[in-house]
Image (cartoon, rainbow, N blue to C red):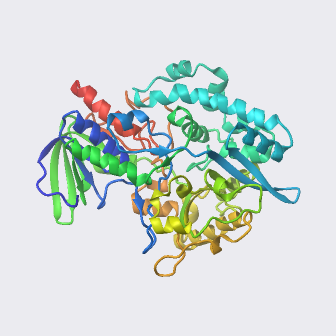
Amino acid sequence: MPAHEGHHRSYDAVIVGGGHNGLVAAAYLARAGRSVLVLERLGNTGGAAVSTRPFAGVDARLSRYSYLVSLLPRKIVRDLGLDFRVRTRNVSSYTPVERDGRPTGLLVGGGERRTREAFARLTGGEREYQAWQRFYDMTGRVAQRIFPTLTEPLPSRDELRLRVDDEEAWRVLFEEPIGAAVEDRFADDLVRGVVLTDALIGTFADAHDPSLKQNRCFLYHVIGGGTGAWDVPVGGMGALTDALATAARDAGAVLATGHEAVRIDTDGSAAEITYRTADGEGAVAARHVLVNASPQQLAVLTGDQPPTPAEGAQLKVNMLLKRLPRLRDSEVDPREAFSGTFHVAEGYQELATAHAQAAAGRLPTAPPSEIYCHSLTDPTILGPDLVEQGYQTLTLFGLHTPARLFDRDNDAVREELLKSTLDQLDAHLAEPLADCLATDADGRPCIEAKTPLDLERDLRLPGGNIFHRELSWPYAQEGTGRWGVETRHANVLLCGAGAVRGGGVSGVPGHNAAMAVLEELGD
């Protein structure tokens, strides 16, 4: 709702920010009988998990920022009675490459036989496929044991290690750089690269970074749902946040859009939240405040010293095509290749080179990226006329493009990077992508690109980091609190992606912040 009229002066809980985590918290607390107010700066709820029509006069509702679902526990969907579904992709990935002067590639999915044959076609034998099976059997077992803990109080490191109950897996994922495991288990450069990509989504790191931030990224990408599968949200990502907003409202929560929280004053037991609207300032009292914003914004609101932002490092591109492009590798149907994750310039050495160039302050000469077509799995995001004409969407996520590279001229560098990224894709196509792009009502190509600086401006993501800060291990450490959402203010909780076990579209921080409040209240 726009600037809300006549909301109460006091609530059991005020939630700052109406992104998906804030809506999860609001729904849980309201369903428990608590009075809840959500203050959202923008004119709509949803945060980064929204669907929009970015191209003028075109009936295509795209997941503009976040775009796939893996980390959302079914428990949250069931608990809140959400009208929300996902669809599984039959193909996991396709990675094109030129070998011995001919176009080929690796298709993972479509059944065990096809995957085995694809590995043999690329590598000439069984070794890499068998190594792949062993490796992902291991991560699958870890996923089954860790994923259920995300909505429980934080385990200690030792407790989680006992739960994993696999010393080799613990060493590979938690103790040594993931690059060591990749190099030890796989011989083919392309296979190595496909494995490594899950460690680099939105994370600017080398395979051997001693900080292990790449391991933390990898872990969250392989444990989702207890399987590691990344699914397509039916109706687009906005379908999830629309369902969450409905659940929160139906339970009695008040959602006030156009209300920007500007200050939180608290003595640890009661708080006052000052907000700004188009009509001026107001204030509301609360017993608890849940902040669905970055740790930096939390510090600004409470008057604390903000932590150093973690740099974002991605390019997000949304496209609408008149048709899918043909591939140089004629043995693969584009409808299969693009239904999963289409890896571009993501061989192991290519990723290392791109990282080294970006770390030296230069745009990668061969920018790595991964692409998928939402509409192949879920055509409902397109209007009936577009579906009938064979239109398709493409979502591209570029790696190793840290925010620092855009400081000199965001617009110019964005265009340079976009061209270079699409050139890498074109190298594997039998026709230029530009020939396949649809045009909007004004005759402009249907393509938009967002850099880390664009995300910082549009969504207030510090440094453009999609996780709000570097991902954390899913166990308790000094200062993390019981649920991983606690702050130094007893009645102020962090329920956004920057909480422990935050990041991605999961609802986990929202669930855990709500549980922390209800636990304190004895519910």
* Quadrant in which residue 345 is drawn: bottom right
Residue at image position (46%, 27%) is 149
Given residues 265 and 340, the one toward you in this image is 340
Whether 232 is drawn above or below 54: the answer is: above
Name the quarter where the C terminus is drawn.
Answer: top left
Answer with left or right where residue 148 lies relative to residue 185. left
Residue 407 is at least partly visible in this image: no
Whether 337 is drawn above or below 141: the answer is: below
From this viewpoint, which residue is outermost toward the right?
100
Horizontal and vertical percent position of residue 429: 72, 65
Horizontal and vertical percent position of residue 112: 71, 37
From this viewpoint, which residue is outermost toward the front?
388
Q: Tally the numbered discs.
A: 0
Residue at image position (21%, 66%) is 278
Name the quarter where the N terminus is drawn.
Answer: bottom left
Answer with left or right where residue 199 lies relative to residue 521. right
Horizontal and vertical percent position of residue 9: 11, 47
Residue 227 is at least partly visible in this image: yes
Residue at image position (54%, 75%) is 445
Residue at image position (64%, 61%) is 361
Answer with left or right where residue 189 lies relative to residue 372. right
Given residues 462 and 391, the one toward you in this image is 391
* Quadrant in which residue 230 is drawn: top right
Horizontal and vertical percent position of residue 39: 25, 52
Answer with left or right where residue 20 lies relative to residue 197. left
Given residues 264 and 36, the one toward you in this image is 36
Given residues 263 and 203, the one toward you in this image is 203
Whether 176 is drawn above or below 195: the answer is: above
* Quadrant in which residue 25 is drawn: top left
